[in-house]
Image (cartoon, rainbow, N blue to C red):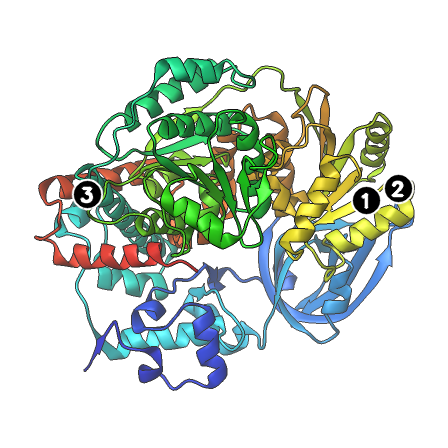
Amino acid sequence: MYMMELTERVENVLELSLTQKNGLEKLHVNTVRDLLWHFPARYEDFSRFKTISNVTPKEHITVEGKITHIDLRKTWKSKVAIAEGTFADATGTLKLIWFHQPYIARFLKDGDLIRIRGEIQSGKRGLYIANPFFEKIDRLSISLNIKERGLIPVYPETRGISSRWLHFHITKLLQSASLNFKDILPKAILTTYHLPSLIHSLRAIHTPRNEREAEGARKRFAFEEIFLLQLSRIKERKLLEKKKSFILKTDEEALKEFLEKPPFTLTASQRIVLEDLKNDIATPTPMARLLEGDVGSGKTILAAIISFIAVKNDAQVAYMAPTEILASQHFNAFSELFKGLRIKIGLITSSDTRVFPSKAFPKTSAHVSRTQLLRWAKSGEIKILIGTHALIEKKVQFNNLALIVVDEQHRFGVQQRARLARTKMQTENPLPHFLSMTATPIPRTLALTVYGDLDLSVLDEMPPGRSPTETMILMGRTRKKAWDTMREEINKGHQAFVICPRIEHDDDRIKSVKKEAERLKKEIFPDFTIGVLHGKLTPKEKETTMEKYKKGEIQILVSTSVIEVGIDIPNATVMVVEGAERFGLAQLHQMRGRIGRGKHKSIFFVISDSQGEKTKDRLHALRNARSGFELAEYDLQLRGAGELTGSSQWGISDVGMEALKNIKMVEAARKEARNIIEKDPELSQSPLLKGEIEIINKKLLHFE
């Protein structure tokens, strides 16, 4: 039998066309290992396929057949757009109806072969399915006798690489080759947790005999991935604890004087976290702390205080924000907080370099050349340097960097924070302390896995003076209530946001920033000034738009979710989110936090044309939840952490993300990882594990 190495390139094993090579690259499949670890997203149980002649009302079914007729019409009273089709197999016909999805009538054509899933309903005109899931197919599975084969895997696919192609070639590899690899998980762990071996799991996940076998394989790979991530993080923490850092003592008198200025009225929660931070930086071990706090809980104030302590020790601070808008906003906030203290603060982004205070006008900032700013940072003259990814550039050098603050941690992921820490230190110098902050609620299992090398602090109290925000849900109804409220608020001198899922108009069912701004101006609010904000604008255009909005020159800002992080407009009292089902609950919660920042009551409208029960449940959870952390746990269970935060941010596969719903599995993996590191910190006795986490660390340090 042919001996195959997992590291072999796929093109050396399979004959591939150029289109197939490009498709595999898009799926990040380069080696035999990548191909074998490209797991099915789900399985079709062909033993449960139905024919139209034997379906019954209230039954959830999967049927394959042909579209025999489809057209578009509107309901008589409400004028709701309906795509209505007739679907047939060899045994009968069935009505299919899609509400609020007129594009389907253009997408599907008479004669198309499709597979549908949904619940059979009974009406005056017979049996039908409302809003069925459907996918086009190139042939009927039953005609290929697949029905007798039970579970068939359905893989993530792309142009040139179909699920059928993947299933055929993966199965062939598993049957024809002797794969040369050893099990990563120690035998003791496999035995303790009743996990199948690697070879058995690979065969079971790709060609399962039943659902139980497939689930057992997924459980094994989920445990393995979480275990390896935990191992990597705990090993990093052990190494960090051996390093030396700066001892930053707090001058209590100077700090007391600093805190006497507004807005430093700290909550009890902020005071507790501040003591943690002060204790951390006063020791020679590098601080590694994650600060979680709901939107508006006062994280930036704590970052300013800890930066003040560092500067009073004649040290430097690097403060990294995920967007130019937020970096600029923090620069302005720090300039105000440190006014009169003779502390030089710099801003560096891809499009701007500034310094505060200006020599000519000490109460304002001034634009300086990039060369001059870098010179001041390197000499130590600039004490606090605020920026975006530009801080990671090799040209940015520090003289005495003692503290790194990364805002909105989830926007960078582990890669960038690791990159920043490593590029700004030399082995002979002390390591800087590290503070990471996020307003995105992170489920406990995700925090334990991805941030296993960080101590965790939580701000669970809101500062006084914040007005409550009312959340109103509009499900497939007229927007009149939202527009009337918006008009009332703007007439009172306030401002509003309208959030859309897309920038460009490319789908009738999804609102876009450009088209919606144009429609609002022409049809709804011709008497108001409307601006747009999205990711395709240049940094200068974004800055100009935000300045106009802050000054009140723009009354309605139509934007993508780019506003969810850090935008602070106390005068904004209304936000309308279109296509709310397309955002995670944590994202919606972040958006809601952009209003209600002043003394006036604010209203948050979430609008969804989806009639699904899950969407209704999610939006009601958003309205009723007491905190973002409660929402995070809810969204994790309902949609998964990949939907919650974007799996690309964490480098965790879909299988790993599903494991995060199981706190017992995460804690078990953490316990086993800790036991191994306690006995063998360098993993010298476990070369397989050492090799695996080296691969993980390379991925984490890869900065795209």
User: Which image quadrant is residue 546 in?
Assistant: top right
Which quarter of the image is occupied by the N terminus? Answer: bottom left
Secondary structure state at the residue bearing disc 2: loop
Q: Are the residues tagged 1 and 2 within 8 Å (C-beta)?
A: yes
Q: Position of residue 14 (x, y in %)?
A: 35, 83
Query: What amino acid is labelled 2 in the image?
Result: Phe
Circle 3 packing at 10 Å, graded few (<14), some (14-19), many (20+), is few
Query: What amino acid is labelled 1 in the image?
Result: Ile
Q: Position of residue 323 (x, y in %)?
A: 55, 47
Q: Residue at label 2?
A: 525
Circle 1 packing at 10 Å, graded few (<14), some (14-19), many (20+), is many
Going from the N terminus, do you reach mark 1 or mark 3 first? 3
- Mark 1 vs mark 3, CA separation in Å: 53 Å
Residue 570 or 16: which is nearer the viewer? Answer: 570
Which numbered disc, 2 or 3, marks the residue closer to the eye?
3
Query: Can residue 12 be seen here?
Result: yes
Which numbered disc, 1 or 2, marks the residue closer to the eye?
1
Above or below 39: residue 212: above
Position of residue 438 in the picture relative to residue 196 (left or right): right
Secondary structure state at the residue bearing disc 1: strand
Circle 2 packing at 10 Å, graded few (<14), some (14-19), many (20+), is some
Residue depicted at x 72% and y 69%: 108
Q: Residue at label 1?
A: 530
Q: Residue at label 3?
A: 239
Going from the N terminus, do you reach mark 1 or mark 2 first? 2
Residue depicted at x 82% and y 54%: 81
Secondary structure state at the residue bearing disc 3: helix
Residue at the far front: name it.
360
